[in-house]
Image (cartoon, grey):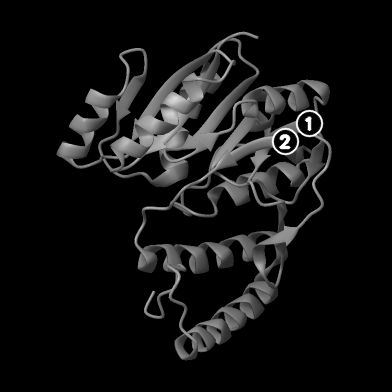
């Protein structure tokens, strides 16, 4: 297949980003890789330049635009360019299994109404969106390799997006900043009649998250409310807020020690 654009969002983790880029280079799919650096510190940026091959384009942004904001910079240019029907969007700590991209593209080629496709995580679950719980995982029975199962929203670790879908629905909502903007994009695609799918057998791992727990906790809660209000209305968002408050009180009493993204203050 022809060369495909891959946009990788990076912030202050050059070693992890280099591992991710090398994992994508090892795929059989020909890629043109661009790393979008979200105003990393000078030392981290210097390490990033040193560790990436010269064939990889690095775009250094003048401020931290967040996940969707950084990708929007690249996607606006991509949509104005000629040709390619798809592009890939990835976090800087995504590790695709050997056949990951081939299976994603095969699924998209088989169904022109697939607007967004994501791989599965090693654990068999799919993402659901509800007015009370926001986005939450639902245990699933794995389907045959290559099967495309419709989901409510994709996960943002790695996504394939179709040009025609983005042209119709628009780009990322930058209010989210991180954690949730990919869910909004997927829910918006579904609202416009596009399919959002998880492709079984196409596997990606996300070894760790590097954002401090207080920020993750804040963004999870805030963006969950944004999402629920947008797609289910003000009443649902109020009920969701009450559930978040109750869960916060519960976690204050029974605190978890496993690195879970929780901060009562946030």
Rendered location of residue 50, percent (x, y): 22, 24
Within 10 Å of the Cα at label 1, are there few (<14), some (14-19), or many (20+) other Cα atoms?
some
- Above or below for 118 versus 52: below
Question: Which residue is disc 1 drawn over?
Answer: 146
- Above or below for 135 versus 105: below
| Label 2 to label 1: alpha-carbon separation | 6 Å
Within 10 Å of the Cα at label 2, are there few (<14), some (14-19), or many (20+) other Cα atoms?
many
Image point 55% across, 54% down: which residue?
180
- Above or below for 220 versus 184: below
The quadrant in which residue 135 appears is bottom right
The quadrant in which residue 213 appears is bottom left
Question: Which residue is disc 2 drawn over?
Answer: 201
Name the N-terminal-most of marks 2 and 1: 1
The N terminus: image quadrant: top right
Rendered location of residue 100, percent (x, y): 63, 29
Q: Element under label 1?
A: loop
The answer to whether residue 73 of the structure is visible from this angle is: no
Q: Which mark is residue 87?
A: none
2 and 1 marks in contact (CB < 8 Å): yes
In screen coordinates, is 87 left or right of 19? right
Image point 58% across, 24% down: which residue?
87
Q: Nearer the viewer, residue 82 or 196?
A: 196
Image point 63% across, 72% down: which residue?
237
In screen coordinates, is 101 left or right of 91? right
Rendered location of residue 10, percent (x, y): 36, 38
In screen coordinates, is 128 left or right of 24? right
């Amino acid at each position: 297949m022809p060369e495909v654009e891959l946009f990788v969002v990076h912030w202050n983790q050059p070693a992890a980003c280099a591992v991710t880029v090398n994992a994508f280079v090892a795929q059989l799919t020909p890629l043109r890789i661009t790393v979008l650096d979200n105003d990393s510190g000078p030392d981290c940026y210097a390490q990033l330049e040193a560790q990436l091959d010269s064939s990889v384009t690095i775009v250094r942004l003048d401020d931290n635009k967040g996940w969707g904001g950084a990708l929007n910079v690249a996607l606006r240019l991509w949509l104005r360019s000629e040709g390619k029907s798809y592009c890939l969007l990835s976090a800087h700590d995504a590790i695709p299994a050997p056949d990951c991209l081939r299976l994603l593209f095969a699924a998209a080629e088989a169904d022109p109404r697939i607007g967004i496709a994501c791989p599965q995580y090693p654990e068999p679950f799919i993402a659901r969106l509800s007015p009370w719980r926001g986005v939450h995982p639902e245990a699933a029975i794995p389907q045959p390799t290559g099967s495309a199962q419709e989901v409510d929203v994709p996960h943002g670790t790695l996504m394939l997006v179709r040009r025609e879908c983005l042209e119709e629905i628009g780009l990322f909502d930058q209010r989210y900043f991180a954690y949730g903007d990919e869910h909004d994009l997927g829910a918006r695609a579904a609202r416009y009649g596009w399919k959002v799918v998880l492709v079984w057998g196409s596997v990606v791992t996300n070894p760790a998250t590097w954002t401090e727990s207080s920020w993750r906790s804040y963004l999870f809660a805030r963006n969950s409310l944004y999402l629920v209000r947008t797609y289910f209305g003000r009443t649902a968002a109020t009920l969701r807020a009450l559930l978040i408050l109750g869960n916060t009180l519960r976690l204050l009493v029974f605190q978890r020690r496993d690195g879970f993204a929780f901060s009562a203050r946030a």
